[in-house]
Image (cartoon, rainbow, N blue to C red):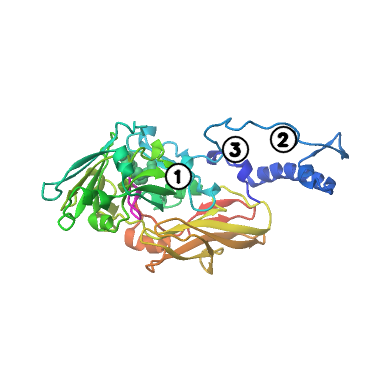
């Protein structure tokens, strides 16, 4: 149906015709094999090839006859060879050096809600490191002795002895979809929405650490989180979030330790809040009573308003959704039944509903939310679509459990204008052409 197995790099798309030619080749082979397959060995014979063009003599493929690879040939498993087009990708030229850049998550090829750790998007301001966990330390202190009575320095073993929790949450860079404020800029969902990933994180609630250190939880209004890399990443986080118990000092990601690209051995998890506050290589937490006005919250990560003023500390990732497949760069090869699938999320809580449209937002129908539907986590949705061969414009619109509705570009630009960078949660449109090609459009 889609071009999953023959999709090239997004910079190098196949046209609808080229795609059909490739598929026709494969289908011809499958069809002739199916005709011959009528016995109990049908499953094996579907993959068998006719010898010398005689459909009655079948040659089984090597994998049905020979001895396969031994156990533990790969002590740490890898994806199939056939999946190697599914990769994190950089947007060439986006930044001057790769150490201060972004790689985007291939949302178009993923299922369910968990991002495989090796495909998690990356955003580094000063490159990534693989820090020796035996040498890593986390210091917890206050602005003065009364603010926090027992400043402490923890090593990883000490942190990992403490009571821990595991929770599934999305992380979205505040700049996700930022290139699209003015008009469409990039062709695929990987580039429009790929600064988004979702994992199960394991760690210690920050509140537990602060209590252990004798923090004054009434006077303390904000924490500062500081990373150990050269970017000087320091972020202010409100204590109201910390007191909810959701903010976590995490070492685990999807059942194993964090990946180096994602902050190994320790990072902050701030559910619902933009990615920049999820400080990686976390080395220090300070408790204070004022926002810290660090460089990444005064010069960067501010929202330009139509008046020309900037708004600071707008950190919640508001309700948003996107159809991940079919999406820009993919091709519908046949008329008939297709599944529209996508992701919805909100930094304020759970997704209540998602509606989809195939006529650019004139008519809407409810999508199916696939469980589990968790707070501040990705939610997978699916909807049926029968293609009659005519053009269509696919959209999805999410509503969260606070009643917030994802805006159209028109609505968002009314209040945010078109020259902003961060926090673009507008409804995404994909146009389906008569050729079957799908393109990024704005209506
Ligand atoms: N120490 C440190 N923490 C950091 C960053 C960084 O460059 N250094 N980048 C931030 C930004 S802008 C984002 S969007 C997220 C990205 O997390 P990821 O690379 O695990 O996807 O990490 C945040 N934490
Ligand atoms: Mo970010």
In space, the residues marked 1 and 3 are separated at their CA atoms by 21 Å
Percent of width and height locating residue 397: 47, 63
Q: Which quadrant of the structure image shows residue 405?
A: bottom left
Label 3, secondary structure: give it.
loop
Q: Which quadrant of the structure image shows residue 253?
A: top left
Residue under circle 1? 255
- Residue 137: in magenta span: no
Q: Which mark is residue 416?
A: none
Percent of width and height locating residue 254: 45, 45
In space, the residues marked 1 and 2 are separated at their CA atoms by 32 Å
- Count of all numbered marks drawn on residues in the image: 3
In space, the residues marked 3 and 2 are separated at their CA atoms by 15 Å
Residue at x 68%, y 54% (from the top left corner):
334
The region drawn magenta spans 268-275
Tell which circle, 1 or 2, labels the residue nearer the N-terminal end.
2
- Which one is closest to the eye, mark 1 or mark 3? 1
| In the image, the residue with mark 1 has its CB under 8 Å from the nearest atom of ligand 1 | no
- Residue 273: in magenta span: yes
Q: Which mark is residue 63?
A: 2
């Amino acid at each position: 149906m889609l071009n999953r197995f023959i999709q090239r790099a997004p910079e190098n798309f196949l046209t609808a015709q080229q795609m059909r030619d490739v598929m026709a080749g494969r289908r011809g082979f499958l069809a002739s094999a199916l005709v011959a397959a009528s016995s109990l060995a049908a499953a094996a014979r579907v993959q068998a090839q006719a010898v010398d063009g005689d459909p009655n003599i079948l040659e089984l493929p090597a994998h049905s006859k020979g001895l396969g690879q031994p156990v533990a040939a790969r002590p740490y498993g890898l994806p199939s060879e056939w999946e190697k087009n599914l990769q994190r990708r950089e947007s060439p030229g986006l930044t001057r050096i790769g150490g201060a850049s972004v790689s985007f998550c291939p949302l178009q090829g993923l299922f369910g809600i968990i991002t495989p750790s090796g495909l998690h998007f990356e955003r580094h301001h000063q490159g990534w490191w693989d820090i020796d966990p035996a040498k890593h330390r986390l210091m917890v202190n206050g602005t003065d002795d009364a603010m926090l009575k027992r400043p402490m320095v923890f090593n990883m073993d000490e942190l990992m002895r403490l009571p821990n929790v595991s929770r599934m949450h999305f992380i979205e860079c505040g700049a996700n979809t930022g290139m699209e404020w003015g008009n469409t800029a990039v062709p695929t969902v990987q580039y429009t929405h790929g600064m988004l990933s979702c994992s199960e994180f394991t760690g210690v609630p920050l509140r537990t650490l602060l209590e252990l250190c004798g923090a004054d939880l009434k006077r303390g209004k904000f924490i500062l989180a500081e990373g150990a890399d050269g970017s000087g990443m320091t972020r202010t986080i409100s204590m109201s979030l910390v007191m909810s118990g959701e903010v976590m000092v995490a070492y685990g990601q999807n059942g194993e330790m964090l990946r180096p690209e994602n902050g190994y051995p320790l990072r902050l998890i701030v559910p619902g809040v933009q990615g920049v506050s999820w400080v990686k290589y976390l080395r220090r937490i300070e408790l204070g009573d004022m926002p810290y006005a660090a460089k990444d919250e005064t010069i960067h990560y501010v929202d330009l308003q139509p008046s020309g003023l900037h708004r600071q500390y707008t950190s919640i990732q508001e309700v948003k959704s996107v159809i991940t497949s079919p999406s820009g760069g993919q091709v519908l090869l046949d008329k008939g039944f297709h599944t529209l699938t996508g992701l919805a999320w909100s930094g304020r809580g759970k997704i209540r509903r998602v509606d989809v449209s195939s006529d650019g937002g004139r008519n809407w129908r409810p999508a199916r939310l696939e469980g589990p539907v968790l707070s501040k986590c990705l939610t997978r949705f699916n909807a049926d679509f029968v293609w009659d061969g005519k053009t269509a414009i696919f959209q999805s619109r999410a509503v969260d459990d606070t009643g917030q509705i994802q805006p159209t570009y028109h609505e968002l630009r009314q209040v945010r204008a078109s020259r902003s960078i961060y926090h673009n949660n507008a409804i995404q449109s994909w146009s389906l052409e008569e050729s079957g090609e799908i393109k990024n459009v704005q209506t």
